[in-house]
Amino acid sequence: MPTVQDFLQELDREAPTTRRALERVPKDKLDWAPHERSLTMGQLALHIANIPGALSEIAMKPSFDVSFVVPRPTATSVDQLLTTLGESVAKAKAVIGSMDDAALATPWKMVKGNLELASMPRSDFLRSVLFNHWYHHRGQLTVYLRETGAKVPSIYGASADEIPGF
């Protein structure tokens, strides 16, 4: 099982990569969306910036009701995205850092009213719902960047626009 320290180190490794992706969001494309049912770039980018802090707080609760409608505000600027990400990562580090390794094994539940949809250790919630969810949306953002003509940063190796170290 991962430790609290493992999750904190992962935040430290991944936050700069997420920041690089958010820095590339074109300020004149915040209202752009690839499809009418898709989030706008500004909504997606702000969601990405908020994920670490918001989901780490949810991880501390015994359960989350999926009936709750998550608001999807849009970013008004790239500066807002970067400030939000910094605050969100700091909050996640504080929340996760306040746990001990034993807390990671305690149960967390996803419910819909009185119906239990899933039950898992908090470590699994952090892995799948916080981190993997964050990476999924960051990947979506790189497609939005490509489609709007923005340069895609390297993430886990070179992109067509950027070679790490050069």
Image: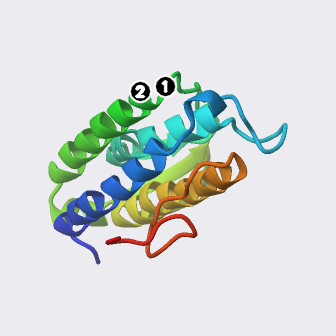
Q: Position of residue 110 (x, y in %)?
A: 54, 51
Q: Position of residue 132 (x, y in %)?
A: 49, 63
- Specify the amino acid type for callout 1: Ser
Which residue reaches farthest right? 36
Q: Position of residue 111 (x, y in %)?
A: 57, 47
Q: Residues within 10 Å of mark 1 (few under 14, many from 20)?
A: some
Q: How many marks?
A: 2
Question: Is residue 16 shown left or right of residue 9?
Answer: right
Q: Say if 137 sits above or below 112 in the image.
A: below
Q: Residue at x 59, y 56 (%)?
A: 142
Q: Residues within 10 Å of mark 2 (few under 14, many from 20)?
A: few
**Nearer-the-camera pick, 1 or 19:** 19
Q: Say if 110 sits above or below 105 in the image.
A: above
Task: Give the image quarter of residue 35.
Answer: top right
Identify the disc placed on residue 37: none
Determine the CA span between mark 2 and mark 1. Answer: 5 Å
Residue that mark 1 sits on: 77
Q: Residue at x 66, y 55 (%)?
A: 146
Mark 2 in CB contact with mark 1 (< 8 angstroms): yes
- Specify the amino acid type for callout 2: Gln
Question: Is residue 165 shown left or right of residue 64?
Answer: left
Is the N terminus in the top left, top right, bottom left or bottom right quadrant? bottom left
Which residue reaches farthest top? 76
Residue that mark 2 sits on: 80
Q: Position of residue 144 (x, y in %)?
A: 66, 49
Specify how the rendered protein is coloured. rainbow
Is the C terminus in the top left, top right, bottom left or bottom right quadrant? bottom left
SS type, badge 2 = helix
**Nearer-the-camera pick, 102 or 140:** 140
Task: Give the image quarter of residue 87.
Answer: top left
Q: Residue at x 44, y 76 (%)?
A: 157
